[in-house]
Amino acid sequence: MGRLIAISNRTAADRGARAGGLAVAVWESLKSTGGVWFGWSGDIVEQPPQCARTLKDDGVEFVLTDLTADEHEQFYLQYANSVLWPVFHYRLDLATFSSEAFQVYTDVNQRIADLVTDRLCSGDTVWVHDYHFLLMGQAMRQSGWNGSIGFFLHIPFPPPEVFRALPEHQEIARAMCDYSIIGFQSDQDRCNFTRYLLEDCHGMTCGGGIYEAFGTTIKIETYPIGIDATGFADAAKTETAQDAADRIGRFLGGRKLVIGVDRMDYSKGLPERFKAVGQLFDEYPETHGRVSVTQIAPPSRSKVDGYRELRQTLDGLAGRINGDYGDLDWIPLRYLARSYDREELAGLFRIARVGLVTPLRDGMNLVCKEFIMAQDESDPGVLVLSEFAGAAEQLKDALLVNPHDTRNLAHVIHTALTMPLDERVHRWRALRSIVAEQDITWWRKTFLDDLNALKFTPV
Ligand code: ADQ
């Protein structure tokens, strides 16, 4: 049995990066199997790096490369995060297309493909992650790797009508077809991609999730990512979790807690959520002094322009709500722009009455699954979930909402706050059984079993 080789832009070698969804998920996978994880060191250098750094942590070997200042700008900030991220989240209005950035994106994919291919042994299982490396399959074929390569897209894949706006859409799709298997978070993402292959690339379906396009055969499937469900449930019962719950409990003073935890990103629907909270206080006076909303949102990618504006918008909205309704002993909406430990988050989720997970578009969203697992089974909180999160395909017993409809969102938050215990328990049990069953181990195993079962190698 060969080694598991993971490739992603950020790795968990940088402990700070473990707050992101991908790093959390891949780390949980590799820790239990051992293997090698290739990615960016997090360092930016002036001259092209001549060699990679290796280190070991918990049985996982990391092979890390620096990015040059130009690569960081064009590959990471521009093409990955100012073109692919907005387009794949259906936000053409926020994309800044650049052929120069695409060239550097292509070059970085090839440079890292060469680095990986040099170190592979036959029998290794290669698993590439996310939108930074859409071209990695093709690049590794060019470096001479003939073994199978799996790819998992952590973010959504847009409908063909949106994807076609990307000037390089054909090149990207062609390169993606050099993977042996592509995994998507949801059926909707999978169908968007396969529809593009059929409509734009003369693709053909062969049944059983197998497609032919660009002269290659590829398996395309849905693998909804999960969390370390039992680990998170246990984390919610630790002393650290209890301390965090006690600290916020002193601030709450018996009020009901509504909580949101997100990376600060325009895809997470934070302004819409804040507006809905404002409408909740506008329309339901009985919530005054009785409900406290806490939003935890650490800044991410603050060098990308849209993020600075987002921060200002949120400051303005929170100021309006607290100015209108706050009192000497009550802050209606608290907004904390920082990270917390996993156990602290678990403790906060556990005492929250409502979990607000309302992205405008999200590949999956792990926070909603963490919220479910952290609950006290005798008195569980209620999950309010956007219908535009991949997780909505699995978590149908949550209160599903359209986050753009802020008036209705306010109404649903109120419904969640007043939901009787028996309905809360009933919904939570159904949600818990899915999150616990389709956990991170199930996700990894389903994907890797399919990858290892592939008998063909692309031509
Ligand atoms: P993200 O966009 O990062 O992930 P998400 O799935 O919600 O989003 O995962 C965030 C992770 O970071 C969660 O484990 C959460 O607990 C943690 N986190 C968030 N805020 C934090 C804070 N303030 N302090 C500490 N930890 C915090 C991407 C895609 C998602 C997809 C994941 C995994 O955008 O759609 O679910 O990858 O595939």
Image (cartoon, rainbow, N blue to C red):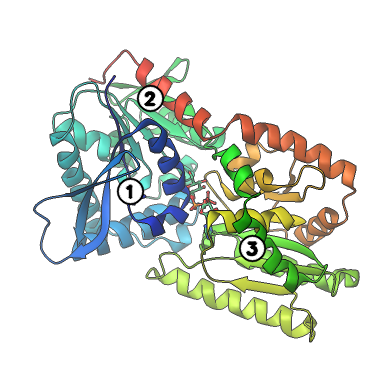
Q: Which residue is mark 3?
A: 244
Query: Between tags 1 and 3, which lies in front?
Result: 3
Q: What's under tag 2, amino acid-wise?
A: Gly
Horizontal arrangement in the rendering, residue 108 relative to residue 165 (left or right): left
- Residue 326, percent across and down? 77, 82
C-beta proximity under 8 Å, tags 2 and 3: no
Q: Secondary structure at mark 1?
A: helix
Please name the residue shown 19% across and 38% down the image.
Answer: 116
Please name the residue shown 23% across and 50% down the image.
Answer: 64
C-beta proximity under 8 Å, tags 1 and 3: no
Query: Between tags 2 and 3, which lies in front?
Result: 3
How far apart are the alpha carbons under marks 2 and 1? Answer: 24 Å
Position above or below: 451 against 311:
above
Choose between 213 and 337: the one closer to the eye. 337
The residue sitting at the front extreme is 239
- Residue 287, percent across and down? 86, 69
Mark 1 vs 3, N-terminal side = 1
Q: Which residue is mark 2?
A: 203
How far apart are the alpha carbons under marks 2 and 3? Answer: 53 Å
- Which label is found at residue 99? none
Q: Secondary structure at mark 2?
A: loop
Horizontal arrangement in the rendering, residue 454 relative to residue 262 (left or right): left
Q: Which residue is mark 1?
A: 132
Q: Which image quadrant is residue 345 in? A: bottom right
Q: What's under tag 1, amino acid-wise?
A: His
- Residue 58, percent across and down? 35, 42
Q: What's under tag 3, amino acid-wise?
A: Ala
Mark 2 vs 1, N-terminal side = 1
Please name the residue shown 54% across and 34% down the image.
Answer: 224
- Disc 2 CB within 8 Å of nearest ligand 1 atom: no
Choose between 203 and 208: the one closer to the eye. 208
Q: Secondary structure at mark 3?
A: helix
